[in-house]
Image: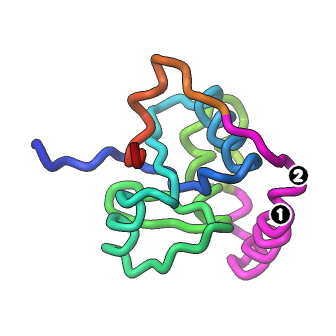
Amino acid sequence: MKDAKPNPIVFYDGECGFCNSTVQFILKKRKRDFYFCALQSELAQKLLSEHDVNIEMDTIYYLKDGKLYERSSAALQISKGLKGLYPILVVFYVIPRFIRDAVYNLIARRRHKIRAGYCALPQPEEQSFFIGANS
């Protein structure tokens, strides 16, 4: 299985402080492994183009078992893999997606003001979960 893709993958804006702090939050709260790929990477462009996605930097994408989720749906799917009460957030699926995404978009437009200039380096034991770095 040399060509096996990491699963699941969270695609995030690698230049956004709020997005980077969200990645750190997922790493701390995860009950299963997640892989992370910056939207600016060639790998993100390749994998997301396979799903006919034109990358939007204010959008979180989540690829799990070949299915791609974005915006609020991605956040809710990610919550299923977290410890504690976070999986209960899936109850928000009862809210129509256009409403959930409107709230998501409100936060996304302000994300640079919420947490600016934050870029944490992963711990050595976490580095294997970051894929597609352009280095």
Question: Are the residues flagged by discs 2 and 1 in contact, CB closer than 8 Å?
Answer: yes
Q: Is residue 102 magenta?
A: yes
> Horizontal and vertical percent for residue 23?
62, 41
Colouring chosen for the image of the structure: rainbow
Residue at image location 45% in from the left, 27% down from the top: 127
Q: Amino acid at mark 1?
A: Ile
Residue at image location 51% in from the left, 60% down from the top: 39
Q: Is residue 59 magenta?
A: no
- Front residue of 1/85: it is 1
Question: Where is residue 81, by image quadrant?
Answer: top right
> Horizontal and vertical percent for residue 66?
32, 62
> Horizontal and vertical percent for residue 121?
59, 29
Give the magenta-colored segment's residue range: 91-119
Q: Amino acid at mark 2?
A: Ile
Give the Cα separation between the discs numbered 2 and 1.
9 Å
The N terminus appears in which quarter of the rendering?
top left
The overriding secondary structure of the stretch rendered in magenta is helix
The circle drawn on residue 92 is none
> Horizontal and vertical percent for residue 61?
53, 62
Horizontal side, residue 81 vs residue 52: left or right: right
Total label count? 2
**Residue under circle 2?**
114
Horizontal side, residue 23 vs residue 102: left or right: left
Question: Where is residue 24, by image quadrant?
Answer: top right
Whether 109 is drawn above or below 132: the answer is below
